[in-house]
Image: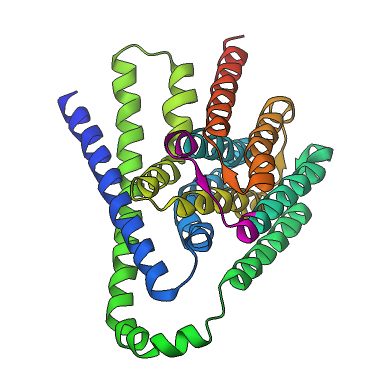
Amino acid sequence: MIFTIILFLLGFVLITKGADIFIESTISVAKKTNIPEIVLGATIVSLATTFPELTVSAFASIQGHTTMSLGNAIGSIICNTGLALGLVAMIKPFKVDKKIFNSKAILLMISVTVLIILGMDKTIGRMDAMALIGLLVIYMINNYNSIPKTGSRRTSNAANIEDSKSSDMIKLVVMFVIGITMMIIGSRLLVNNGIKIAEVLGVPQAVISLTVIALGTSLPELVSCLTAIRKSHNAISVGNILGANILNIVSVIGLSSFINDIPILKQTSMVDFPFMILLLLILIIPTFIKQKIYRFQGLLMILTYIIYISTLYFTYID
């Protein structure tokens, strides 16, 4: 038990320190390249933090546990929005870049709409996967077009950028990889040993599965978001969540359903999808209108997430 507690604490240290390194390297990349932080959050940060969901869902699909693939991706979207971004908004409301937020939000809602339409026959098959992967290509093109084409700025800073490119950028990439690796390893240690501690304390298996395990693959997004706002770089947080949510649909579900057909259970249609849509609407509609994420939005998202977890708990108990 002592060894389990030590590993649990080690996981906590790794994930928090890893998040520090991860966000600091992202901020440095933004400063050196002049790429907006929200774009970096929606690209390299969200790609890195979505990697756990991608691997878990892909391997689950390979092993035939296809419902787990879909549940992991949808559950991650709900956790990312309701818990991670809800906490961010509660702690520190902030303005967003209108053009970039709107484009990512529209792509996210298109992805959700396409997923629901494709799932109307209760299965996400290989042809459906091709449509989702097509959206992934569109998302990548959108991200590329979001990067400012620095003409005169590049000329004035050309010498500095070129001088630092070879050594500094390599160092930043190495630190970025170290940071995300520490976060992934830390989250695994935290989750696996947290389950053992909960079992020793007599916590019911249903409660463990709905809390510790459900949070597991979303821990990188959660910790990186909280670290970003602690360092006053809120744009990275919202970019990370929007990007991760889109990637959960177009890459995680897309790849998993390409490997094996994914059946859509009644609970997914009746509980998971409605809560996912509700959370996204709470996030997107007010922000779309006011170009700001408010504390009240964060409160609503957290309350919705708590209601979702409670609904699942009582569903499983029944």
Report the predominant secondary structure element of the magenta stretch.
Answer: helix
Between 12 and 185, the one lying in front of the other is 12
Q: Is residue 105 above or below residue 78?
A: below
Q: Is residue 247 above or below residue 192?
A: below
Highlighted range, magenta? 87-101
Between 85 and 71, the one lying in front of the other is 85
Asked whether residue 136 is in view, the answer is yes
Check residue 122 for magenta coloring. Answer: no
Q: Position of residue 56 (x, y in %)?
A: 50, 45
Tell me which residue sits at (33%, 19%) in the image.
198
Between 272 and 280, the one lying in front of the other is 280
Q: Is residue 169 left or right of residue 136?
A: left
Q: Is residue 1 left or right of residue 124?
A: left
Between 118 and 301, the one lying in front of the other is 301
**If the image is split into quadrants, where does the N terminus sit?**
top left
Q: Position of residue 212 (x, y in %)?
A: 41, 28
Q: Is residue 298 above or below residue 176?
A: above
Tell me which residue sits at (58%, 40%) in the image.
77
Asked whether residue 51 is in view, the answer is no
Check residue 92 for magenta coloring. Answer: yes
Q: Position of residue 303 (x, y in %)?
A: 55, 23
Q: Quadrant of residue 28?
A: bottom left
Tell me which residue sits at (39%, 42%) in the image.
226
Q: Position of residue 108 (x, y in %)?
A: 67, 50
Q: Quadrant of residue 149?
A: bottom right
Q: Is residue 183 left or right of residue 218?
A: left
